[in-house]
Image (spheres, rainbow, N blue to C red):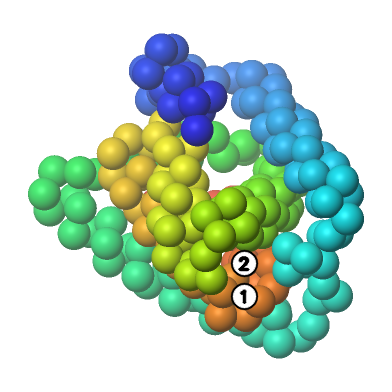
């Protein structure tokens, strides 16, 4: 919650910084992202190990073809919904700065790293934000309701993307709500992991501004 927005607020302007990225600097950022996110997953894994609940308790059971179908359908629907919301935000002066596009590598090594980042983000972020955070908030709050865990998880998810500006924060928070609803509906993390991976991976081919 503090690390990513802290970089945006305390460091140089993200747009100016990203415009001046060299291939080497971009590769370093991507590798750092991979290491950081797997470290977070490691903490989640240790937590469920100590709790004797296991990853299956978070919804990470054996994947099935229905999860693939859910993931694809959700991804396509999310593109349409978020594109529409992005257009509406632009009409009130909240345009996405396009900073994610500046991170997309053009060299072969960088593109391979981007695929690894997409896999990492899809898996680790869904485990952390949906699987662990939401379920543990329900236990902490001693409630059967998913409403507050969904809101908290979505807002934190959005806060971690504040380098994309206010429009990015709003869109990613809404996206977080959508991922949470998918998780609640299917009871599995796999549809969200698949959709999340596709969202990031397709940046290599289509400049999706979400």
Looking at the rendered structure, the secondary structure element under dot 1 is helix
Contact flag, marks 2 and 1 (Cβ < 8 Å): yes
The foreground one among 170 and 115 is 170
- Give the residue drawn at x 65%, y 26%: 29
Residue at the extreme front? 142
On the image, the x and y values in percent for residue 38 come to 77, 39
- Give the residue drawn at x 33%, y 63%: 83
Query: Disc 2 marks which residue?
Result: 192
Looking at the rendered structure, the secondary structure element under dot 2 is helix
In the displayed structure, does residue 143 sit left or right of residue 59?
left
- Position of residue 111 relative to residue 32, above or below, is below
On the image, the x and y values in percent for residue 17 come to 45, 18
Specify whether residue 83 is in view: yes
Distance from label 2 to label 1 (Cα)?
A: 6 Å
- Give the residue drawn at x 73%, y 63%: 58
The foreground one among 58 and 80 is 58
Callout count: 2
Q: Residue 134 sits in which quadrant?
A: bottom right
- Position of residue 103 relative to residue 119, above or below, is above
Task: Tell me which numbered mark, 2 or 1, is placed earlier along the sequence.
Answer: 1
The foreground one among 207 and 132 is 132
On the image, the x and y values in percent for residue 71 come to 62, 75
* Label of residue 3 in the image: none
On the image, the x and y values in percent for residue 144 come to 53, 71
In the displayed structure, does residue 190 sit left or right of residue 201?
right
Query: Disc 1 marks which residue?
Result: 71
């Amino acid at each position: 919650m503090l690390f990513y927005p802290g970089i945006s607020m305390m460091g140089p302007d993200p747009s100016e910084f990203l415009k001046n990225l060299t291939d080497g600097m971009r590769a370093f950022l991507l590798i750092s992202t991979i290491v950081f996110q797997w470290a977070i997953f490691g903490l989640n894994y240790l937590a469920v190990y100590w709790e004797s609940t296991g990853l299956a308790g978070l919804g990470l059971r054996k994947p099935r073809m229905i999860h693939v179908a859910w993931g694809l359908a959700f991804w396509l629907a999310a593109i349409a919904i978020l594109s529409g919301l992005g257009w509406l935000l632009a009409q009130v002066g909240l345009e996405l700065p396009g900073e994610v596009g500046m991170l997309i590598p053009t060299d072969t090594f960088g593109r391979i790293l981007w695929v690894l980042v997409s896999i990492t983000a899809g898996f680790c972020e869904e485990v952390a934000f949906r699987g662990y955070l939401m379920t543990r908030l329900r236990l902490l709050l001693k409630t059967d309701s998913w409403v507050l865990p969904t809101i908290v998880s979505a807002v934190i998810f959005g806060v971690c993307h504040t380098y994309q500006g206010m429009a990015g924060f709003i869109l990613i928070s809404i996206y977080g709500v959508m991922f949470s609803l998918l998780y609640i509906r299917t009871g599995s993390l796999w549809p969200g992991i698949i959709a999340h991976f596709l969202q990031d991976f397709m940046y290599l081919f289509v400049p999706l501004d979400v």
